[in-house]
């Protein structure tokens, strides 16, 4: 059984296989930002409270500051950079949640936004959006992320807006 | 901050995990979900020499619900337990409490058994283990044993387990017949550590009179405590029992501490309010459960 101080990990990030050699104490959040150069994932409190660093691991929202990079070896990670899709014409199509954030002015300074986007996108992608979203569901979706600018009103508006646009399959 | 340097192993079997733990000695720590451990490392409140990650160990990610109770494996995430319909039928308190554990993103990774092994008196599942009179199964190099909750919790973030040991599962006995449960907590933000929380189990007799009331509280003592509140409402019909009297009894039994978030008096007040509120809900359920 190998007991290591450093390891090489292979992670599929936003659909692209990536590899990095990291100290085993490297947090996933730091590996994404420093080793892989994906600075869209923001680091706020670094102990799981603020939610800014939330990424999707095999599709499920998780705090990247509460995972070691070595723990996602072989897994698939989606960061905020991976939410948009190719539009087939060389450009990108924003995720409906990103569109809704723009539409509803759901961000001000933007620091917390990546964590909100990943969390809400995963939540709405997983639910049956032909059913109207309830206020409780909206609260649950945004309740684990801290935003100190908006007061949440526009973020909640954006969640409802995104859920409504995701009602009709595109 | 960042965690202090440590060594890392991710054994593929339980035997291998125990072997590494034995070899690495007292500085080694088991890593499961890591949702409590990683913050401790980043804040440098803990600095283990070696982390033994058990996430690759097979067979630890199952929930088994039988008539006797629910056995939860060491790698079952909070959200998996929350969604387990069979487990909720056997012991409804599990889903009710789990819904209050942190936020969905944390519940996707954090494990129920890990939060018990973490032994935080403000944790939901430590109190639920106590209230249901549950136990954990502990694997060591010399064999496997069951440890009841009373023998497990020693102090805040401290259990009786020493040396190389892996908690492989927790067992929560089934809710008895004619019984109801409820869970409620007060937190500054939903999902944050509770300022105070209450879990109750209430049992009725054949003629729908209260025969037993027990409660456990979060963030109140140094270890989970179970209080018997039966005396306040014994023999009273379920529809007209004075739950406030049980709340008053509970207020006198607990000895909460003051901290940054709440004074001892405020916590004692919450114990009364939450006891009354949860007992009313548990009574409604007990009335419908055969």
Image (cartoon, rainbow, N blue to C red):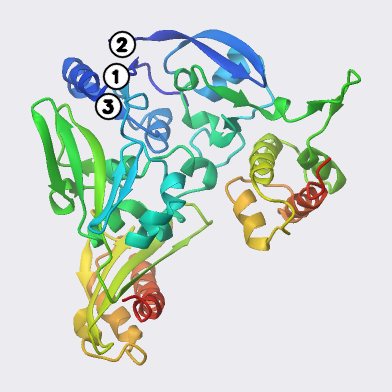
Residue B201 in the image: x percent, y percent? 29, 70
Other-residue count near label 2 (Cα within 10 Å), few / some / many at <14 / 14–19 / ≥20: some
Q: Are marks 2 and 1 on the same chain?
A: no
Image quadrant assignment for residue B74: top left
Residue at image x 64%, y 44%?
A126
Residue A76 in the image: x percent, y percent? 58, 23
Can the viewer see residue B19? yes
Residue nearest the viewer, comparing A48 with A125:
A125
CA gap, disc 2 and disc 1: 8 Å
Residue nearest the viewer, comparing A143 with B188:
A143
Pointers 1 and 3 in contact (C-beta within 8 Å): yes
- Residue annotated with mark 3: B29
Can the viewer see residue B260? no
Residue nearest the viewer, comparing A22 with B9:
B9
Residue B144 in the image: x percent, y percent? 12, 35
Q: Is B81 situated above or below B195?
A: above
Q: Is A120 situated above or below B124?
A: above
Residue at image x 37%, y 90%?
B239
Residue at image x 24%, y 50%?
B171
Label number found at residue A3: 2
CA gap, disc 2 and disc 3: 13 Å
Other-residue count near label 3 (Cα within 10 Å), few / some / many at <14 / 14–19 / ≥20: many
Q: Are marks 1 and 3 on the same chain?
A: yes
């Amino acid at each position: 059984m190998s007991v290591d101080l450093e390891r090489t990990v292979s992670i599929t990030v936003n659909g692209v296989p990536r590899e990095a050699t990291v100290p085993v104490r490297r947090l996933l959040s730091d590996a994404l930002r420093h080793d892989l150069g994906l600075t869209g994932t923001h680091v706020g409190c670094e102990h799981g409270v603020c939610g800014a660093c939330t990424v999707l691991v095999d599709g499920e929202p998780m705090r990247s500051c509460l995972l070691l990079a070595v723990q996602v070896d072989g897994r698939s990670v989606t960061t905020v950079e991976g939410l948009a899709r190719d539009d087939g014409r060389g450009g990108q199509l924003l995720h409906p949640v990103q569109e809704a954030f723009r539409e509803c002015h759901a961000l001000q300074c933007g620091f917390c936004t990546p964590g909100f986007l990943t969390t809400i996108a995963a939540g709405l992608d997983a639910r049956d959006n032909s059913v109207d979203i309830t206020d409780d569901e909206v609260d649950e979706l945004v309740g684990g992320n801290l935003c100190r600018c908006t007061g949440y009103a526009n973020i909640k508006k954006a969640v409802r807006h995104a859920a409504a646009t995701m009602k009709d399959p595109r | 901050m960042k965690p202090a340097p440590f060594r890392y192993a991710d054994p593929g079997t339980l035997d291998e995990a125990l072997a590494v733990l034995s070899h690495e000695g007292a500085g080694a720590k088991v890593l499961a979900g890591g949702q409590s451990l990683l913050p401790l490392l980043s804040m440098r409140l803990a600095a283990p020499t070696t982390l033994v990650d058990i996430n690759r160990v097979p067979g630890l990610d199952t929930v088994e619900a039988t008539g006797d109770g629910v056995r939860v494996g060491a790698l079952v995430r909070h959200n998996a337990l929350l969604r387990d319909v069979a487990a909720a039928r056997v012991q409804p308190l599990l889903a009710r409490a789990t819904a209050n554990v942190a936020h969905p993103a944390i519940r996707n990774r954090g494990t129920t058994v890990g939060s018990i092994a973490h032994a935080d008196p403000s944790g939901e599942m430590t109190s639920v283990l106590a209230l249901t009179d549950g136990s954990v199964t502990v694997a060591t190099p010399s064999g496997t044993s069951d440890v009841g909750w009373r023998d497990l919790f020693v102090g805040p973030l401290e259990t009786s387990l020493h040396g190389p040991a892996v908690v492989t599962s927790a067992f929560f006995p089934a809710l008895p017949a004619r019984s109801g449960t409820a869970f409620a907590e007060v937190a500054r933000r939903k999902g944050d550590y509770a300022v105070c929380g209450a879990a109750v189990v209430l049992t009725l007799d054949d003629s729908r009179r209260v025969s037993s009331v027990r409660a456990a509280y979060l963030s109140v003592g140094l270890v989970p405590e179970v209080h018997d509140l039966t005396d306040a409402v014994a023999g009273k019909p379920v529809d007209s029992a004075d739950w406030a009297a049980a709340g008053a009894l509970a207020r006198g039994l607990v000895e909460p501490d003051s901290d940054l978030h709440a004074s001892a008096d405020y916590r004692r007040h919450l114990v009364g309010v939450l006891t009354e509120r949860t007992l009313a809900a548990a009574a409604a359920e007990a009335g419908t459960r055969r």
